[in-house]
Image (cartoon, grey):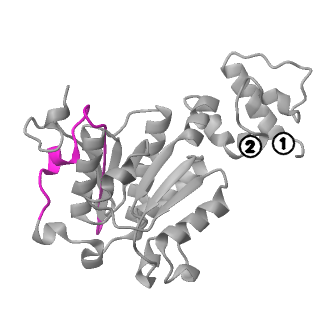
Amino acid sequence: MGLISGEVKFFIALTITFEGKIFHPKYKFDDKRIFQGFSMLTPEQLSRYSRNILLPDIGLDGQEKLLAARVLLVGLGGLGSPIALYLAAAGVGTLGLVDNDSVDLSNLQRQVLYDSSSLGGAKVDATAARIASLNMDVTVHRYPVLFAEENGASLVADYDFVIDATDSIGTKFLINDICVRAGVPFCHGGVLEFIGQVMTVIPGKTACYRCFFKNPPVGDGAKRCSHGGILGSVAGIIGSLQATEALKFITGVGDLLTDSLFICDPSVNMFRTLPISSRDDCEACASLKV
């Protein structure tokens, strides 16, 4: 097993002191008994997640919540790439991956999950392999399918939180409608050209995607990045924010982007949050409001 580093000893002492627990001096830091009564985490996990645990609002309890959490990620492209990596690195215990696409050369400009060796392979397989190499604590479920009306409810049913990282406007509305009906919280993200947006929805409590956008756009308003282009780093910004929303939801830390839409255009240094009100006539969520 090996001794725990001095740095890790220091953070364990801080954590125990912070939570008002007294460390008994008869136990050595390399003795597994030190963790009994404090945490179910192994010494390796305490070291791996030390920067999470050092955050007072997360601590050991928050890390245990992350390891027990189940998140469904729909879309493994420009947004899904940073989301998958950050959630896996943070120790989210179960990740469901939904994507029916394969890796194309044009993806490598922004989809940082992949490299040249991934070309032609299924995105769910390449992502699962990347996660396994990053963190073996994470259990991955692969769904090489298109998220659709026929399978959506069954896909979200076993998860605590859903992340919409798709580039299809129709799928975004579908994820909203299915998650609202199922009562599963989710985070929407979208990016096109230089502009990105993020919002989180807690069904029955906050405004949903349709409260703001109402119906899918047509024409130019519905174009994908394959037609309109996208700056890869903007996808990184939005995907990172979506991952942060998931981590905040799981741990209960901070304020979620609910009843609001974060929007940015880094090309002109514009970052703002717009308030969103629930609509009494919203076809997706009006009947759920209490």
- Decide which of 289, 267 is in the foreground and name it: 289
Q: Which mark is residue 47?
A: 2
Residue 205 seen in render: yes
- Which of the two discs, 1 and 2, labels the residue nearer the N terminus? 1
Q: Is residue 180 above or below residue 24?
A: below
Badge 1: how crowded within 10 Å, few (<14), some, or many (20+)?
few
Which quadrant of the figure has residue 234? Answer: bottom left
Q: Amino acid at mark 1?
A: Ser
Q: How far from the left and from the top, in percent, is residue 204?
A: 25, 33
Q: How far from the left and from the top, in percent, is residue 38?
A: 72, 25
Element marked by disc 2:
helix
Badge 2: how crowded within 10 Å, few (<14), some, or many (20+)?
some
Q: Amino acid at mark 2?
A: Ser
Q: Is residue 239 left or right of residue 48?
A: left
The magenta segment is 192-217
Quadrant of image for the C terminus: top left
Q: Is residue 203 a member of the stretch shown in magenta? A: yes
Please name the residue shown 78% across and 40% down the image. 43
Tags 1 and 2 touching, CB below 8 Å: yes
Q: CA distance from mark 1 to mark 2?
A: 8 Å
Q: Is residue 119 above or below residue 271?
A: below
Q: Which residue occupies the extreme left position in the image?
A: 281
Please name the residue shown 65% across and 55% down the image. 135
- Decide which of 129, 212 is in the foreground and name it: 129
